[in-house]
Amino acid sequence: MAASQTDDFLRMLSTEHVEISKRVTDLRQFWSEVNELGDGPKYEEMGARIRELRDHLAEHFDLEEQGGYLAGAIQRAPQLAEQAEQLKQQHLQILDILDDYSSRLQACGESYQCWRDVLVDIEQFLDLLHEHESTEAAIIVETLDADNHS
């Protein structure tokens, strides 16, 4: 991939990370509003929102892995290859976790305790996702910065 194409691709991934952050914020806001209004639990809607996030992440991960996971970044900064590989290994795990939450919400029935349990787990997961995306973003920024300083 040519340098300008790589830069464009990395910038596009950076924009995509902003979109994922927005979707996570929206998910948290929905969950918070349901709890604050005492209008819940809303298993079906929350499950649908989790599936939407999962589908978006699947597309995002496919995009990242085109031509090799962060291949342009690794070509420019080979010292990041091991870190990038660790992140790539998390992609399937992240999607599987979201599938599990969606299934758990469907199985909750009328149990409010189930709603709370899934909330706790999703909050922990969203922190993991934030860490994952932040680390990817740092690789992108480091790569672009390295090019600007060479």
Image (cartoon, rainbow, N blue to C red):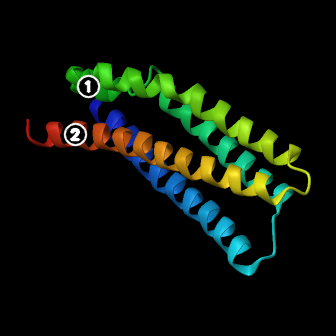
- In contact (CB < 8 Å): disc 2 and disc 1: yes
| Disc ID at residue 72 | none
Residue 139 horizontal/vertical position (percent) = 29, 37
Q: Residue at (73%, 36%) from the top-left corner?
A: 99
* Quadrant in which the N terminus is drawn: top left
Mark 1 is surrounded, within 10 Å at the Cα level, by few (under 14), some (14 to 19) or many (20 or more) other residues, namely some
What residue is pinned by disc 1? 80
Up the image or down, 122 lies above or below 96; here it is below
- The amino acid marked with disc number 1 is Leu
As drawn, the residue found furthest toward the front would be: 113
Q: Nearer the viewer, residue 72 or 96?
A: 96
- The amino acid marked with disc number 2 is Glu
Q: Please report whichever mark, 2 or 1, sits nearer to the chain's N-terminal start.
A: 1
* Quadrant in which the C terminus is drawn: top left
What residue is pinned by disc 2? 142
Q: Secondary structure at mark 1?
A: helix
41 left or right, relative to 14 = right
Residue 35 horizontal/vertical position (percent) = 70, 71
Q: Residue at (22%, 40%) from the top-left corner?
A: 142
Residue 90 horizontal/vertical position (percent) = 50, 28
Up the image or down, 113 lies above or below 107; here it is below
Q: Residue at (73%, 72%) from the top-left corner?
A: 34
Q: Residue at (39%, 28%) from the top-left corner?
A: 70
Q: Is residue 66 visible?
A: no
Q: Is residue 139 visible?
A: yes
Up the image or down, 148 lies above or below 79; here it is below
Q: CA distance from mark 2 to mark 1?
A: 9 Å
The part of the image, by quadrant, that contains residue 62 is top right
Residue 45 horizontal/vertical position (percent) = 81, 59
Mark 2 is surrounded, within 10 Å at the Cα level, by few (under 14), some (14 to 19) or many (20 or more) other residues, namely some
As drawn, the residue found furthest toward the right would be: 109
Q: Nearer the viewer, residue 9 or 69?
A: 69
